[in-house]
Amino acid sequence: MTTSINNTPLKTTPLIDAHKKMGAKLVDFGGWNMPIHYGSQIEEHHQVRRDAGMFDVCHMTIVDLRGCDVMAYLAKLLANDVTKIAQQPGKALYSCMLNPQGGVIDDLIVYVMQPTWVRLIVNSATRTKDLAWMHTQLGSMAIDLSERDDLAMIAVQGPNARQLAQQALVNDRTQADTLKPFNAQLFNESQENERFIARTGYTGEDGYEIICANEQVEDLWEQCAKVGIKPCGLGARDTLRLEAGMNLYGNDMDDTHTPLESGLSWTVDFSNDFSNKERLFIGRTALEQQLKEGLRYKFVGLILNGKGILRAHQKVIVEGTEAGELTSGSFSPTMQKAIGFARVPINTGDQCLVAIRNKLVPAHVVSLPFVRHGKILPPIIE
Amino acid sequence: MSNIPPELKYTASHEWIRTEEDGSLTVGITEHAQGLLGDMVFVELPDIGDEFEAEQDCAVVESVKAASDIYCPIEGEIIAVNEDLEDSPELINVNSYHEGWLFRIQPLKAEHVDNLMSADDYAELVESEAH
């Protein structure tokens, strides 16, 4: 095996000392010094599927938008339609932000707290280009766009995560127990102990994502540890999201692939807006053109039917047609099998071959996700 | 600091080598290497009778995180492989110097062993990579 040496100073989150105290194995994660695991990535994966685990996700970028043009702005910026939830305070929506060619600039979660105030969570690796793009699209709209690097975020996930997190939050004057899935609520607004609690996540389990001031997150982390929520690294986060069929930006979609060929058609809303006009979001024309010409690829799950591990960039061989490619792959701790996502020719059937080093290994083509709420889903052949 | 048994030889690519009584060499990956890779989930071993040159890739270990090539430390012929790893790749995590051994090789020339790194040299390498 080989190792690499990187001398660029790494960024750290406010939880770096807590990680070191808890025995984290720290790695360079896109320029951030982040825990990959605290001993065993597989045990941490099971911890989230069976009980409750927590993740430091402070590296992610939080952006607040305020102003009377926020809805009009997002109706143009995002491929999914936030105006549909404008009158449901706290509701969250997953969406892609597209370039004019229909390529994905980034995927994000938007929490519509009020029609004039939304909170976006975008990826850390795409932070610079996202902010630049969002600023460019502002034009003369009456919107205040501010990056909230004063805020920290942790995710608590698992079947017991909400109940345990409420114990951990007991002194923070929050009432998150009535929060519905995919909803968020702000508690103690503008006070020192402000808590933004969202019933969202990236693992396929129930749980919360909690945002608080940088200065308070170490206390919150320790409170969570005290009630039995175990720290989990970004290694487990990746296998959890893979089993849950959730895309990873940069792997599964990017600037050169549209959501329609990245398994994200369900996030693109072509329907008319509230005034029954065509909603002209950026990238729409390109996507309509792609549909008119016919999609050439589909995005599927693969379960390896032989020896080896699926990895991103392995070639997928389908009889009688051109090759496809794995976009993500790993070992599924829940299924005890190698699984992955692949972009394959549209007429691919239920079987394919994957080139793993010098061998061709058979794999089943299935729909996503593989696992949801702790249960392995029966494989649905595409 | 991870365990680096003084009686073994090492490579810069993190394999360890033990000389057996019959002159054959047992090969595995170091404790430091298994720590970097994390939980092992798959091992692809050479076949008995395969011949390799020094530094030729001859096996693959895969953790949840990544696949990593194993380089043959010395020119020779494979005479045994650790078949237990097929069902239990995690043996490498449990004890990389014993149950987690990978394969045994008969070196073409016994004196080639002298070209390998000592435990002290390897410890120095691990130390330098940490900075």
Image (cartoon, coloured by chain):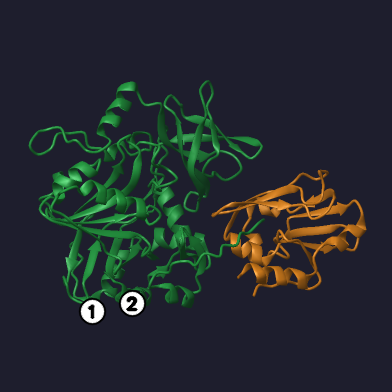
- Residue B56 location, x and y as percent? 76, 48
Q: Determine the secondary structure under disc 1.
A: helix
- Residue A15 location, x and y as percent? 40, 73
Q: Nearer the viewer, residue B109 or A145?
A: A145
Q: Judge if badges 1 and 2 mark residues of a common chain.
A: yes
- Residue identifier under label 2: A223
- Residue identifier under label 1: A171
Residue type, label 2: Gln
Examine the rendering and report whether any part of residue A217 can be seen.
Answer: yes
Chain of the residue displaying label 1: A
Residue at image x 34%, y 60%? A159
Instruction: Identify the colour of chain B in the image.
Output: orange
State the image quarter where residue B114 is shown.
bottom right
Residue at image x 77%, y 58%? B27
- Residue A311 location, x and y as percent? 54, 45
Residue type, label 1: Asn
**C-alpha separation, residue under disc 1 versus residue under disc 2:** 10 Å
Direction front: furthest residue: A140
Chain coloured green in the rendered structure: A
Q: Quadrant of the C terminus of chain B?
A: bottom right
Q: Nearer the viewer, residue A221 or A207?
A: A221
In the image, is residue B113 above or below residue A254?
below
Residue at image x 65%, y 62%? B33
Chain of the residue displaying label 2: A
Residues at marks 1 and 2 touching, judged by CB atoms closer than 8 Å: yes
State the image quarter where residue B120 is shown.
bottom right
Left or right, residue A176 beside residue A217: left
Left or right, residue B85 beside residue A78: right
In the image, is residue A359 above or below residue A123?
above
